[in-house]
Image: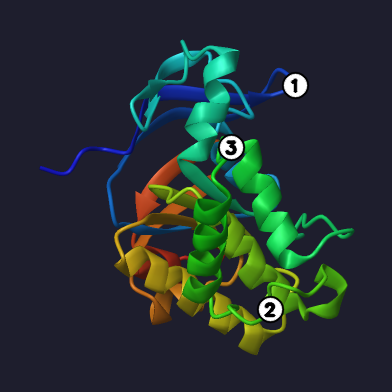
Amino acid sequence: MNKTLIKYSGVELCQQEHIVLKDVELEINPGEFIFLLGKVGSGKSTFLKSIYGEIPVYEGEANVLDYDLLKIKRKDIPNLRRKIGIVFQDFQLLIDRSVNANLEFVLKATGWKDKNAIEEQINHVLKQVGMETKGYKMPHQLSGGEQQRIVIARALLNSPEIILADEPTGNLDPETGKDILELLYSIRKAGTTVILATHNHSWIKTYPGKILVCKDEKLVFTNIDEIEDDENFLA
């Protein structure tokens, strides 16, 4: 029986005492691909940050990967984050070291010590994202699409159960963005849950998945028909 990875009930999320989302009720299960849609400032990033403990939850019930977010201790947040892969729009690679060194840094920071195991895992994730020959390169020697593939490889290092991707194609041209979407979708097919925040509504027609919408301080699942019927949706 599949366990629920994320469960929120009656959750309220705030930024600097301002309520961003309220009465959040949702369950997210293994292997799901979820599009997170909403205007700028509607709460997409706030929701994603709450999942990995960047923004605290003070009201309701919130469980992520068996962690109670209302009771989680600060010292346990790194353990939660090791189970979650995060893909940022702006890459956030260390520019003064190679791809391999970027990935090695993350593994050592999350407790890996065996040199051979580290090398093997780096090779494994680079192969997953089609970058197995690029490990020696510096970030500035890679295209935007290649850098984003490295970011996805970094997110996969600790074999996470959930990938959170916050506008991962926002700085990429459409064709490269499509390649990144296909890569994330293939990761989902391997059993990892992917939550993708995006402004590109065309993806939801090409890649079947659930649709989660931030609007009017609400976070609700909807379907593509409701979005297409609403001419002002996210306008």
Q: What residue lies at 39% left-to-right and 73% top-to-bottom?
A: 186
Name the mark on residue 16: 1
User: The C terminus appears in which quarter of the rendering?
Assistant: bottom right
Q: Quadrant of the N terminus?
A: top left
Q: Which mark is residue 110?
A: 3
Give the mark nearer the N terminus: 1 vs 2.
Answer: 1
Whether residue 235 is visible to the viewer of this picture, yes or no, is no
> Quick check: 27 above or below 147?
above
Where does the image place residue 80, in percent across and percent down from the top left?
Answer: 48, 30
Which residue is more in the foreground, 38 or 126?
126
Q: Secondary structure at mark 1?
A: loop
Marks 2 and 3 in Cβ contact (< 8 Å): no
Q: Residue furthest left?
A: 1
Tell which tag, 1 or 2, sits nearer the viewer: 2
Cα distance in 3D space between marks 2 and 3 = 23 Å
- Amino acid residing under circle 1: Gln
Residue positioned 33% across, 26% down in the render: 66
- Horizontal side of 122 relative to 206 (left or right) equals right
Q: Are marks 1 and 3 in contact (CB under 8 Å)?
A: no
Asked whether 164 or 207 is in front, the reply is 164
Q: Position of residue 46 (x, y in %)?
A: 62, 37
> In percent of the image, x 70 and y 48: which residue is there?
105
CA gap, disc 1 and disc 3: 30 Å
Q: Earlier in the sequence, mark 1 or mark 3?
A: 1
- SS type, badge 3: loop
Give the residue at x 72% y 71%: 147
Q: Residues within 10 Å of mark 1 (few under 14, many from 20)?
A: few
| Residue placed most toward the observer, 209 or 154 | 154
Q: Which residue is mark 2?
A: 134
